[in-house]
């Protein structure tokens, strides 16, 4: 049973459009670079160009071998470094959905 891990973030309102662009690129590069580094992580993609109709700025779409692999990813030092350095300081909201496929 594979597990999907999907997150939608909204960036902070006080960031300029230029800052938001830089932050989005940093989030995409940081998270996508985790592929091949974390046990059980099958795929990881970050979308940073939402249509105007969207109310989220960034989407993470990732797949794991199992729920245990997802739990390991959550605390893996390389993931935590990206989350603490490139994501959390710049986001105001986070919505997450994990599900089995």
Image (tube, rainbow, N blue to C red):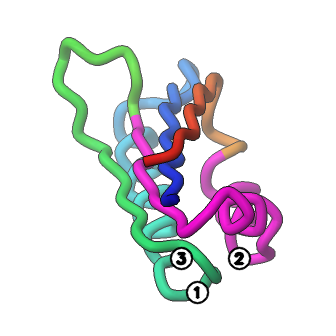
Front-most of residues 44 and 13? 44
Residue 84: image quadrant is bottom right
Q: Name the residue carrying label 3.
A: 34
Q: Name the residue carrying label 2.
A: 78
List x then y, in percent, for residue 25.
38, 57
Cα distance, mark 2 to mark 3?
A: 7 Å
Secondary structure found at label 3? loop
Q: Which residues are magenta?
A: 58-87
Q: In the image, is residue 93 above or below residue 47?
A: above
Tag 3 and tag 1, C-beta contact below 8 Å: yes
Cα distance, mark 2 to mark 1?
A: 8 Å
Q: In the image, is residue 86 above or below residue 53?
A: below
User: What crowding class fits label 3: few (fewer than 14 Cα within 10 Å), some (14-19), or many (20 or more)?
Assistant: some
Tag 2 and tag 1, C-beta contact below 8 Å: yes
List x then y, in percent, for residue 89.
71, 43
List x then y, in percent, for residue 67.
67, 57
Tag 2 and tag 3, C-beta contact below 8 Å: yes
Q: In the image, is residue 79 above or below residue 28?
A: below
Question: Image point 57% across, 39% down: which residue?
Answer: 98
Residue 62: image quadrant is bottom left
Asked if residue 38 lies in the magenta stretch, the reply is no
Secondary structure found at label 2? helix
Question: Image point 42% across, 64% down: which residue?
Answer: 44
Residue 40: image quadrant is bottom right
Q: Name the residue carrying label 1.
A: 37
């Amino acid at each position: 049973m594979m597990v999907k891990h999907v997150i939608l973030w909204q960036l902070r309102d006080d960031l300029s459009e230029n800052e938001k662009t830089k932050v989005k690129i940093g989030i995409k590069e940081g998270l996508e670079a985790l592929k091949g580094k974390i046990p059980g992580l099958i795929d990881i993609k970050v979308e940073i160009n939402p249509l105007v109709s969207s109310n989220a700025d960034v989407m993470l779409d990732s797949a794991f071998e199992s729920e245990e692999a997802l739990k390991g990813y959550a605390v893996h030092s390389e993931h935590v470094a990206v989350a603490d350095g490139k994501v959390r300081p710049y986001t105001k909201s986070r919505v997450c959905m994990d599900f089995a496929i």
